[in-house]
Each structure stands twice: as structure tokens, then as C-alpha cells.
Image (cartoon, helix red, strand yellow):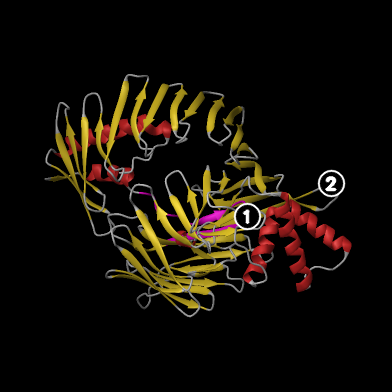
Amino acid sequence: MKPVNSFKLTLLLLLLSLALQGGVNLKNGNFYISYTDIQIAKTRGALEDITRTYNSKSIEIGLFGYGWGTLIESRLYAYPDGSLVVAEHGSGGKTVYLSPFATQDMLDLMIDQLLEVSLAEGSLPNTPNALANKREELQNNQESRHSLWNKYLKKGLVAYQSTLPVGAEWESFERGRERIVKTENGYSRIKSLRIDDFNTEGLLVKIDEKNGDYTLLEYTNSHLAKISNADGTSLVFTTNEDGFITRITSGAKEATFKYDGLDLVYAQDAGGNHYKYVYDEKHNLIKIVYNPVRLKGQAEDARYISYEPKTSFVAKIIDRNGEETAYTYKKFFKEDGTIDDDHYATTVHKTGYNGQQVTNEYEYYIGVKENGDRFSQQIITTVNGIKTATTYDETCELPINITRGTNTTVFKYNNRCLLTEKLSTYDSVYMRYHPKLEKLTEVKNDQGVFTFEYDTKGNLVYASKNDDTWVKLHYDERSKITKMEQADKTLVFEYDERGKPVKIQMEGAEESGAIHVTYDEYGEITRVDSEDGHSMALKVTQAFQNLLALVKPAGVNLSM
């Protein structure tokens, strides 16, 4: 067989996900970076690796110490006001879920309990004015209310188990439409492509991708001990006396970790890469060494991060290649001269490719919802001298107007926060959705009318453009595409025990043939062969591109 290098690149782009990157959140000055420590050579399962992310703004202490979090640390918290919060990745963002079962009485009881504990602890003066002000704050600011409850929960001063009945539902639109349902054993979070199960403690116990690919999480004394996939592949965790992970094993593969107090200071991943981490006294990550184990005389390979002393916002990053990026933060003031906490800006200073200094600015206006939650109401960016203003909807927190120069784009959504119209200076797009699946069934734009049909699992089975260009898709029990039919050709897919496509056969075209794909133990493509050489590879690539163009308006994941 002949190796097909150009097609290998195309197939990589089609079948593999992008690696996680690090950077700075310009809205809050947070430095973040991710590392994948170990991968699982799975055939059936929802989890294929352990990837940890550091957030400098996080004050959470997770499985990998201060500021680090992982998907498996996502945790659910129930509050007496009837709301639920999922702390994503442990140290990541928080998603709030609300229920129609929640009442004002529930809210009042929660506030009364918080005030009572605050008085007993001595953190709140026992005066009518102080009590009234604190009650008003807790009434109108959900984030403040949850934060205070979490503080007392960690101290063991409060406790709560939801008394709402099995079958009760909560809903959120912060990350697309998501639901949480109360179950006999805890809670199930239902997303478009995944179900997350939490136990009554709020610990994540199962990740289910709805197609037979699931992962179970096992705990010993509320500490993660083992992760098992549907196919039996597993990860085993060893922890120290503080509960921090010191070792992860999967078969012969191993990743190890070392700590200094609460800080992760050293990691060696399963691929043999070593990392050293250095922090300041506030647990801010200030240095990453990529070759802590090196030959004598070899230069240190490192990235440096510095922070503003008062806010701990990122001030400067010096990358491994020596390139510097500086960040400054602008405050705005109200008419009475006080600082406006809901209006601020970040300026990024960097040397351009021509050696000239480049300065871009990002300005934020924060809105406040009725429940006290804050959201980005408007963001104004000035990048390379071009100004763009984006205004967001309060309910969906999605763009409703984007203006760049003389060009304007307006967005409209339905009551499920699904985009229904996009009207711009140059084109218009109209969308309709399946009433239950909430997936696109029709898209009208300047290219024509696209229609989409799905099976009961939500898999796309038919797509057409203007009723003349079409494709039919067939799936196996795991929702993997087995056949792709078009008017003049058919592609047939064969998979290995890991669910990776190993053969793609073209039938019915003027030229028939096949390509074969080989992977290493980690599931990475190592070779693409075809007895028919480059010609067949190009034909298969073209068929893929035609399919992608047809299903692109629906945002369909081909689950290859």
C-alpha cells in the first residue's frame, strides 16, 4: 500500500480534537493553562484522559492542590433557596440552575439562617442597620448568598439536603440549554450530548455520552479512588494524607505528582514530560519550567507570569521564546466619584511581527439581573484599530447586536435561547428547530434552504440543500457513522475495537477504492494507506468536505 501523507493531515483535522491552550481571561485577569497527564486506550467510555487546568483566580483546593481543577472534579451544590450550582471542573466557572419549585419562603429561610450564623460567629454587628443592609444584599445578590453559604458549609456551620421531590427539575441557559433532574440517588444533569450523574453529596459519579459510552467514578471516604470506562479500562489514583493525587496508573502507564504544602510543584506525565511549578505567597503560578530535569549546561526552558500586587490580575507574561505581553487594567468612576465595579477595561500590549508595539483594548459593561446575578451586558473591543461593540441578552447571555464600523448584525432567540434569526448588513439567516430534540431542522440563508432529519437518538440521518443535494447517514448502536450515501457515491466505514475508523470504502463512484488508517496505542493516527494512492485519498477527502459543507449549518458532530 502507498502512504498518503497529505490525506493524513486532513483526516487528523477531521477526526481529532484540538489541544488545550493557556492564556489570560481579559475580563478578570485570570491566568489559565491546561496539561494532559495520562490517556486511556479505550474502546467504550466517556473519558479518555485526565487533563488538569490551573486558574489563578480560583481559591479552590482540588485533587491537584490549590487552583487546579479537572473535569472529574465537577461538583453539584444544593442551596436552601431552591437553586443548584455546578462548579465546573472543580476550580472553573459556576453554572446556576433555577427551579419553578423555588419560593420566596425558601429564600427567606436561607437568609435567616445565614444571618443567624453570621451573628453567632461575630462577623455581623447586631444592629438594625447592619442586619437590614446584609439582608438586602443577600436578597438581591445570589452570588453573595451562595458564597456566604459555601463559607459556612466548609466550616460545618450549615448543612442542607434538597427536600424537593424526585423528578423536580432545574434549568440553566448559561452554557446552552441544560437541565438537572432530582433522582433517587442524587441528580442527573442533562446536556445535549451528555448526562452527568451526581450523588447526594454532589460528587460526580457517572459521565454518560448516551450511546453506550460511559465512565464511572468510584470514591473512598469521598476521595476519588478509581475511574472505570464501559469497556473495563480504568485509571487508579493514589493520594497523600492531604487527599492530593500523587500517582495515576492505567496499565503500564503512570503519571506522578509532588506537592509543597497546598501547591503542586512537580509533575511527570505518562509520556515522560517533566514540569516544575513555582508560586508566590498567594498561590499565584509565577513560573513554569518545562525541563526541570536537564543536562548540565542546558538552558532552562521556562515561562514567567507576574501579577498586580493588589488585585492579583496578570500583569505580564514572558513566553518560552522570550516574547513579552503586558496587561493593564482601567477603572471607571460613577458621577459621585466612586469606582464603578460594573464598568472596566483591559489593555493588552504586545510587540507585533514588524517590531512595532501593538495595543488592543477590551472594555466591559456588566449588567445585573433581577436575582442579583451579573452578566456581560456589553463588550467593546478595539483590535488593530477596529472597534467592535457586542451587546448581550440578559436571559440567554448571548449576543443580540454586534456593530463593527458601519456594519451591524442583529440576533434573535426563542424562549429556549436557540438562535432563530441572524440579520446582518450583508446577509440573513433564519432557523427552525425540532420541538423535542431542539436541533436544527431548517436553515434559510443566501445559499438556499437546508433541511435536516434525525433519528430518535438525535443522530442526523438526512440532510439536503435546496432539495437537490442530499446525504443519508447510517449509524451503529454506538452512534458511529457506518454508511454515508450521496447521489453518486457511498462511503462505508469500519472501526476497530476502540471505535476508531480503520477503513473507509468508497462505492458506486466512477472509481471505487478504500483507505486504511493505522493508530498507535494512544489512538493517534500513525499512517494512512491506500492501494489506489493519492487519487483515492483525494476523492474520499472531497466526499468528506461535501458532507461537512452540507451539515455545517446544523453544527452537527459526525461522531467519527
Q: Is mark 1 on a helix, strand or loop?
A: loop
Q: Position of residue 84 (x, y in %)?
A: 59, 54
Dot label at residue 98: none
Q: Is residue 19 magenta?
A: yes
Residue closest to the far bottom:
241
Report the amino acid beneath label 2.
Answer: Glu
Determine crowd level at label 1: few under 14, some 14-19, many 20+ residues with C-alpha closer than 10 A.
Answer: some
- Residue under circle 1? 28
Q: Does the magenta stretch include residue 462?
A: no
Q: Position of residue 91 (x, y in %)?
A: 54, 61
Quarter in which the N terminus is drawn: top left
Q: Residue at x 58, y 34 (%)?
A: 415
Q: What element carries label 2?
A: loop
Question: In the image, 17: left or right of 84?
Answer: left
Q: Which residue is drawn at 73% across and 58% down?
A: 109
Dot label at residue 335: 2
Residue 453 lies, with reference to residue 152, above or below; the image says above
Report the amino acid beneath label 1.
Answer: Asn
Question: In the image, 293: left or right of 426?
Answer: left
Residue 509 lies, with reference to residue 216, above or below; the image says above
Whether residue 332 appears in this view of the structure is: yes
Residue 411 lies, with reference to residue 529, above or below; the image says above
Q: Which residue is drawn at 62% across and 55% down?
A: 28
Question: In the image, 36: left or right of 333?
Answer: left
Q: Position of residue 277 (x, y in %)?
A: 48, 71
Question: In the image, 330: left or right of 536?
Answer: right
Sequence-wise first label, 1 or 2: 1
The magenta span reads: 17-35
Give whichever of 429, 186 is nearer the camera.
Answer: 186
Determine crowd level at label 2: few under 14, some 14-19, many 20+ residues with C-alpha closer than 10 A.
Answer: few
Kindly indicate whether the residue at mark 2 contacts the one at mark 1 (C-beta within 8 angstroms): no
Q: In which quarter of the image is residue 145?
A: bottom right
